[in-house]
Amino acid sequence: MPIASMFQPLWDASGFKAETPIQEQVYQPLKDGRSLVGLAPTGSGKTLAFALPLLEQTTPGAGLQLLVVSPSQELAIQTRDVLRPYTQAAGLHLVGVTGSANVKRQLEQLKEKPEVIIATAGRLLELVESRRLKLATLKTIVIDEADEMLREPGLSQVRELAQAAPEDVQLTFFSATESPLFKDLAKEFGQEVEIFDVRDIDHTQGAVMHYFVQTDNAHREVWLRHLAHLDKFQALVFFNQNAVMMKVARTLSHQSVKFAVLNRTDRSTTRANALNAFRKGKVRLLLVTDLAGRGLDIPHLPAVINYQTPTRAEAYIHRAGRTGRMGAKGMVVTLGDDHDLRDLRKLVPQYDIVRGYLNDGKMSTEAPKEEAAAPKLAKAPRTATMVAPAQAVAPVAATQPAEAVKAAPVRKKHHKNRLRDRKNKGKRRKP
């Protein structure tokens, strides 16, 4: 992929040495206006793979020509921030259009007639249907995280956008995982779509360890607390349900853990502040659901934690892809019981998932020596590795201490006093 001279300084400043397989393979087809699917691992440079050739084909002052659709506000904002320096270098104007942002402000920005728009589908359709945004000059639609976007309601939204665009619009879809719909795109959208799959030849991801920590529901929060206190530790914590995430957040708010939450019901500024705090290292844990965490690029992220075991292979792949990006090392820690481990190994057999333990403040595959002596405590973090072991006494202790039995006579004495008071009830006390 030849880098255009106007983009070369930005490319060099980013530290890129060579093009990735997906960048090489889709460059010319995109410039030729061909519709395609680009399949490549997470962290392999898909954003620049579609952006650079398409921006080269975009003409300043000729109206909206490039539209990138993302499944979440966070990903749309991230893509906007990545592409803005490149659009400026090309003399193009870029605008972000997301659902929870101020509509009036977005309308003011659209009056400047941007050539490039990065958007979430819902807000974009609102503007198109109200005729506040016209797609008559649109040349290309990019569907990012396409496997997610082509599941309802996303599929219907993408269809509506394609129908509102010119008949010969170029359709491109990029994803890290396959979707059954990729083979039926010609039927869905009425044009032939080529598939470029480089997943087997792309080796841009670094070494990632996949740990499974055996625990029960009662101790998952304990594990979160102590993982957060490991040296130089930071992680995205994934949940299957928003309600479970908020319950854990309420518990952690009473612990000495620096964390933030990406809650889909929060205001856009609240979510942006949470993500910025995490990126700047001000918080150790960022609690997210699969949709909120889709496509997030956190440079040098040490770890990903699956608080709940994912039920779809695609979910695990995308979660794991947040760490170990562009050659860096990383780890995935999944919390669960033996049933969860068995199901997970069947779900994603391509990963070597090993049992993980805390040893001397680090994740390890070696079980602590006291494991054999106290198998009943194997589900809880070992006190030898805890930063604040005193706080863990209550969660770890599963039975009542033996000394508590001695308290019984006190209750019996109180009972005798109660019987005496009842017997003397109504009798006059002697002066």
Image (tube, rainbow, N blue to C red):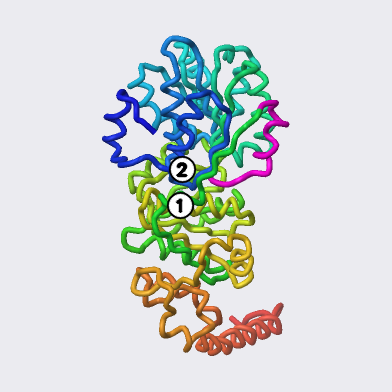
Quarter assignment of residue 303: bottom left
Q: Which residue is mark 1?
A: 236
Three-letter residue code for mark 2? Leu
Q: Which image quarter is the N terminus in?
A: top left
Disc 2 and disc 1 in contact, CB within 8 angstroms: yes
The percent position of residue 420, horizontal first and vertical second, equals 66, 85
Q: Tell me which label, 2 or 1, sits earlier in the chain.
A: 1
* 107 w.r.t. 401: above or below: above
* 326 w.r.t. 124: above or below: below
> How many neighbours does mark 1 have within 10 angstroms: few (below 14), some (14-19), or many (20 or more)?
many
Determine if the magenta segment contains residue 279.
Answer: no
Looking at the rendering, the stretch of residues picked out in magenta corresponds to: 176-191
Q: Nearer the viewer, mark 2 or mark 1?
A: 2
Numbered disc total: 2
Q: Which residue is mark 2?
A: 296
The percent position of residue 324, horizontal first and vertical second, equals 40, 53
Determine the residue positioned at 58% across, 60% down: 348
Report, in whole angstroms, how far the alpha carbon at label 2 lies from the one at label 1: 10 Å
Residue closer to the observer: 426 or 7 = 7
Instruction: Judge from the rendering whether residue 322 lies leftward or rightward of residue 191; answer left or right.
Output: left
Residue closer to the observer: 346 or 263 = 346
> Label 2's element?
loop
Three-letter residue code for mark 1? Leu
Instruction: Judge from the rendering whether residue 85 lies leftward or rightward of residue 178; answer left or right.
Output: left
Quarter assignment of residue 341: bottom right
The percent position of residue 108, horizontal first and vertical second, equals 47, 13
Instruction: Judge from the rendering whether residue 358 lies leftward or rightward of residue 145; answer left or right.
Output: left
Q: Which mark is residue 182?
A: none
